[in-house]
Amino acid sequence: MLFTSRQQAALSTRFLSPVAPMLEDLFLALRAETDQALGRDAPPRYGKPYPYGYCLEITKDVQARLRVRLKQPRHPGERAIKAYLNSGGAARRVWGALRERFFQNAFHIGGLYIDVSNDTVDVSKPKVEILPMDRSGLEPIRDAAHFARIAEAYWGVTFYANHALPSLAPLFPMIGVDARGKARLYSDIRYMVDLFRSSQFAKSERWLEDGPAPPMALVEAIRRPCPPALLGANPSATLAAALQACRSARADGLASDEDWLEARAHDLLTTRAPSIPVLERG
C-alpha cells in the first residue's frame, strides 16, 4: 500500500481528522461542480454513460477546483487542508490498483485516501470515499505483469510481449488486444513509463522475457500502420532485438534522456491507426 510518513500522519491527525465530516462535505460539493461541468456533454465510455470510465478526468477536475478554493478558503474543510499544507503537509494525486480489481485515481492527503470518483466503475456506489490510506486497498503497480493482471480483468485486454517494434520495447514493452480485436502498444500512462525508466528498463526486460510471445499475425498488425522510418529502425521483430534495445538504452543512459523519451512517444503515436485513440485510462 502507499506509505504515509510518521510526520504526515501526525499532521493529518492534527488538522484533518477533527473535520472528517466536513472534508466529505467539501469533496461532495466539488464533485457536484465537476459533474455539472463534465457530465452534460461527456460521451459514453465502453458503452456506458458518464461517470463510468471518467475516473481520471473527474479527479483532475476536482483537483483544479480545490486549488482555486484554497487560495481563499471559506469552507471548514478548505481551511483545514490549507492549515495542513501550510504546516508542511503533503497532498498528491495517486494512481494504482484498488483492491486488486481495477485501476483507480485518488488523492493521498496526509494519512487519508480520498477518492472523488468512487462511482466510475460501479455507479451505485457513493461518489466520494474517504478512508485511512492503510485501509484503502490502493497499491502501487509493481511491474508489467501486475499491470497486465489488473488490466485483463478490468478492461478485458489480453497482453503479449512487444517483439513487434523493439526500439519502443524499453518504454512500451507490452502489446494489448482488446475485446474488439484492436491491438496497440502499452502503456502511455505516465506512471508506467516512469516505472520502466526508474528500473533502468529491467522491468521491461522481465516482461519481454516472461510475457506471452505475440502471434505472428499480431506482430504484423502492429507493424502494418507504421511509417517506413519506424519500420527501418526495426528490421527485426524478435525477442532478442527487444531485449537488446533495453540493454542498449540502459548502457546509453537513456532512462534520463527527455529528448529520447519524447521521440519514442512520437513514434508510439505513429503506430496508431486513425480509429484507435491514445487513451490514459483509469
Image (cartoon, grey):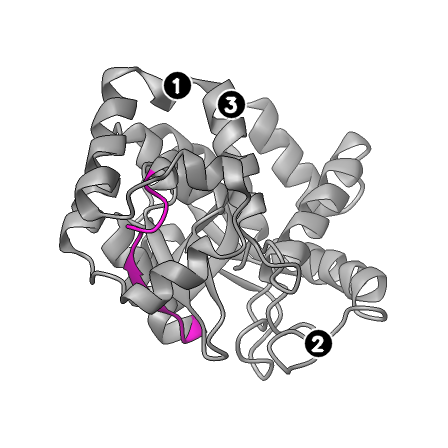
Left/right of residue 52 with respect to residue 133 in the rendered view: right
Q: Earlier in the sequence, mark 3 or mark 1?
A: 3
Residue bounds of the magenta highlight: 155-166
- Measured in 3D between alpha carbons, the distance from the residue under mark 2 to the one under mark 1, in whole angstroms, is 38 Å
Label disc, if present, on residue 88 of the rendered structure? 3
Q: Which image quadrant for residue 177? A: bottom left
Is residue 26 or residue 277 the one in the foreground?
277
According to the picture, the residue beneath numbered tag 1 turns out to be 256
- Residue placed at 57% from the left, 45% from the top? 270
Q: Earlier in the sequence, mark 2 or mark 3?
A: 2
Element carrying mark 3: loop
Q: Counting other residues with Cα less than 10 Å from the Cα at mark 2, is it few (<14), some (14-19), or many (20 or more)?
A: few
- Residue placed at 48% from the left, 33% from the top? 264
- Residue placed at 58% from the left, 71% from the top? 120
- Residue 234 is at least partly visible in this image: yes
Left/right of residue 98 with respect to residue 64 in the rendered view: left
- Measured in 3D between alpha carbons, the distance from the residue under mark 2 to the one under mark 3, in whole angstroms, is 41 Å
Label disc, if present, on residue 44 of the rendered structure? 2
